[in-house]
Amino acid sequence: MAENGSLGRATRRALQTRQRLKEASLALFIESGIENTAIEEITERADVGKGTFYRHFTNKEALATALAEDAVGHLLERISEAERECRSLDEAVEGLIRAHSKFFHEHPNEFLLLFQRRVFPQVQQDTPQEFEAPYLNYLEGIRREVERFIARPVAPLRIRRLACAIAGFVSGLFSFAVDGIAAEETEKSRESLHRAFVATSSAFLLEGEIEEILNLNGD
Amino acid sequence: MAENGSLGRATRRALQTRQRLKEASLALFIESGIENTAIEEITERADVGKGTFYRHFTNKEALATALAEDAVGHLLERISEAERECRSLDEAVEGLIRAHSKFFHEHPNEFLLLFQRRVFPQVQQDTPQEFEAPYLNYLEGIRREVERFIARPVAPLRIRRLACAIAGFVSGLFSFAVDGIAAEETEKSRESLHRAFVATSSAFLLEGEIEEILNLNGD
Amino acid sequence: MAENGSLGRATRRALQTRQRLKEASLALFIESGIENTAIEEITERADVGKGTFYRHFTNKEALATALAEDAVGHLLERISEAERECRSLDEAVEGLIRAHSKFFHEHPNEFLLLFQRRVFPQVQQDTPQEFEAPYLNYLEGIRREVERFIARPVAPLRIRRLACAIAGFVSGLFSFAVDGIAAEETEKSRESLHRAFVATSSAFLLEGEIEEILNLNGD
Amino acid sequence: MAENGSLGRATRRALQTRQRLKEASLALFIESGIENTAIEEITERADVGKGTFYRHFTNKEALATALAEDAVGHLLERISEAERECRSLDEAVEGLIRAHSKFFHEHPNEFLLLFQRRVFPQVQQDTPQEFEAPYLNYLEGIRREVERFIARPVAPLRIRRLACAIAGFVSGLFSFAVDGIAAEETEKSRESLHRAFVATSSAFLLEGEIEEILNLNGD
DNA sequence: CATGAATGAGATTTCATTCAT
DNA sequence: AATGAATGAAATCTCATTCAT
């Protein structure tokens, strides 16, 4: 039986339509921004009637949230993978970077949606409340990853800062290697930049937690 | 006599109104995004009539461009300052970071406007053509700063990438130190991260120096 | 054998569905008005699919007309009953009031549909053409009842006015006795009000009996 | 100086436009019902642009509420007038009828809006919450009028019932005299109907308040 | 210069109706 | 006969822009 075999045909068709709307809108949101994309553009690109949009999403924001949820899902998958392999806080941060990197290469549009289209906040400032749910989900994934190596709970604000730093750093890093192949020398430099970022992040997380450092490093 | 003393009273008042509009809009653009800010919100916040807006700016985009120009002006001032003091490519990149950092602390809203509100692009993707003029101006400032220490012209694309990397890196870095005071250890880590970024950037700029010069015209 | 026993099972089920749709819509029409009730609300309340609606009624108006026809049917039953017992014009008008009253107590929602939800007009104004058929049916019932005691035909307009007056009067009267039990004194007062209304109505119907007959055709 | 002389010309013009919208919509609401009237029909009839509507009213409901408020204002004026002249509960109820009657003849469309277009509820049922404010205002006017002659406060529900009864009764009464001139006999009948209604209403209000009757009648 | 009422193009949203299953 | 996904016409609503004062 097919993947959706247990669902009625109508339901299956509805899911397809929903998927088409999501794909069309993701592309458009990246191209022109969420606010500059008219719902009619989305339905035209998805080749469905305008009214069909509203059978699947209450409004544009709900669609954007659904996209963000999908994207966070994919990103968290990568983070979970990394989680399994690491044995120290440094490795955990390193794992987060790698997870973001993989996510970027597998779902570049989703990456851009989250980190460049104001779905996720950067630097401090207000948290866009509309996308709060997926964003909190994402922060929770990061918290889980790093807290395994820190004796006490990390303040939510600190997690948020780490997330912003990772986003900025990864975005910046990609600028150096956008076409994939960099010279060997740059590659080496990037590695050391990488290591430096990891060290800084770890220090930031452990700040004011001397004893923890001892416990973990001596492990 | 005051700076505007030589202008008629009417002109002086007009400049004040223009300034009020710029201040009001900058705050709103940061709060809710450019697209989500209605012109009437701006004029209300600036406490002027709606029609007055159009005496000063042809439309919202022109206002945003004016804000971007102001911001770039401030940022370039800091870059020029840094320029005077540096003696090597590493120092030049270091100077750029410092310049961005100073700019961020002096004009945080302008920083956010340029680097978080999609006035300037991040990662590759489309260059927002609407804000091309101030953006090119900014890239030119960066180019001047780094080219003094590189024998041959650097490809425009490479400059753009450097700019994006700096923006991402600085944004990320600020996440670690948003409330200003960080523990000494983190501070040290950040310095080494700093140095690593500088080294990577320099290597990136010098990468394949020789052969590249030949096909320089490609953007 | 049940009432529908001679019909096939499918037909019986169809009748049931039709009935469910009518019940659901009557309740909703009273709650929120005909125009404010979406067909989907009706089908949801009746717990049938949206498409099913169109198997039973061509559109919302047809459904409303069907409801109005049912209601008029019930009201006319009561009017016929009253008809049998009365021996004078006064008694006929009295019978009409009683018939409306019984109808109100037996089918309050149907009463409200006809007299409060603009299915039947009140005061003069336009006759809602959409519900013309059941309305004319109702007027005809009233005409039959009163004409038995008036030598010549009563002008249609006068019948319509009488109908409106009865509707208003009965609506008003119910306000005094909505919870059923009123004090004895009020009860007495209501009876005299009742009698006064009957007398007025009779006078109205007989007014200018003679000359009117001449220009009877005018509506 | 003209009536609006103290207002700016712009404000004066705005008030005119608002008035035009109200007049156009009142006519249309009576002709076809609130729900069946499109905003564009209103603006066309008022001969203003579609967007102009929204400068004056947030939506159709707000406009309808404004109309209801105006109407209640006019009706309350008449009620206040009647208030001054009456000396007993019977006269107070009589005054209310007269006030409604005058209101009907001066502002027939406003009367119909309130009492026939479901702006005010008739018979019990739900009170349409959207028009709550003007409706409560109206009830308050009625309460004031009758409470002057009743020692103790009258229950709000009883006031509401009285209001409904008056509305129904007056609506019904008008059916008999819509073209103004009725035969002398009918006129006499109507007067006695009138008196009967007044007596019933008074009894209803005083129900269970024996001592008050004594006090007032002995006055 | 400053104003804010008016405007209408275009966006969002609703919902009666169709139709393939 | 029953279903509900899809549809698009028509409604509501927003807002950048104009213009008379």
Image (cartoon, coloured by chain):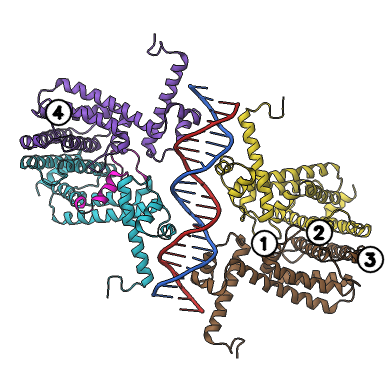
Chain colours: A cyan, B purple, C brown, D yellow, E blue, F red
Q: Secondary structure at mark 2?
A: helix
Whole-percent x, y for residue D118 in the image: 67, 56
Q: From the viewer's perspective, is residue A131 above or below residue C169?
A: above
Disc 4: which residue: B146
Classed neighbour count for the residue bearing mark 3: other residues with Cα under 10 Å, few (<14), some (14–19), many (≥20):
few
Whole-percent x, y for residue B187 in the image: 17, 33
Disc 2: which residue: D175
C-alpha separation, residue under disc 2 versus residue under disc 1: 18 Å
C-alpha separation, residue under disc 4 versus residue under disc 1: 79 Å
On the rendered structure, is D179 left or right of B134?
right
Q: Which mark is residue B92?
A: none
- In this rendering, do the residues under marks 2 and 1 share a single chain? no
Any part of residue C206 in sight: yes
Residue beneath the point at 86% across and 76% down? C86
Q: From the viewer's perspective, is residue B77 above or below residue C149?
A: above
- In this rendering, do the residues under marks 4 and 3 share a single chain? no
Whole-percent x, y for residue A197 in the image: 15, 40
What range of the chain is rendered magenta? A103-128
> Marks 1 and 4: in contact by CB < 8 Å?
no
Amino acid beneath label 3? Ile
On the rendered structure, is B13 left or right of D203?
left
On the rendered structure, is D121 left or right of A42?
right
Disc 3: which residue: C210
The verdict on residue B42 being magenta is no
- In this rendering, do the residues under marks 4 and 1 share a single chain? no
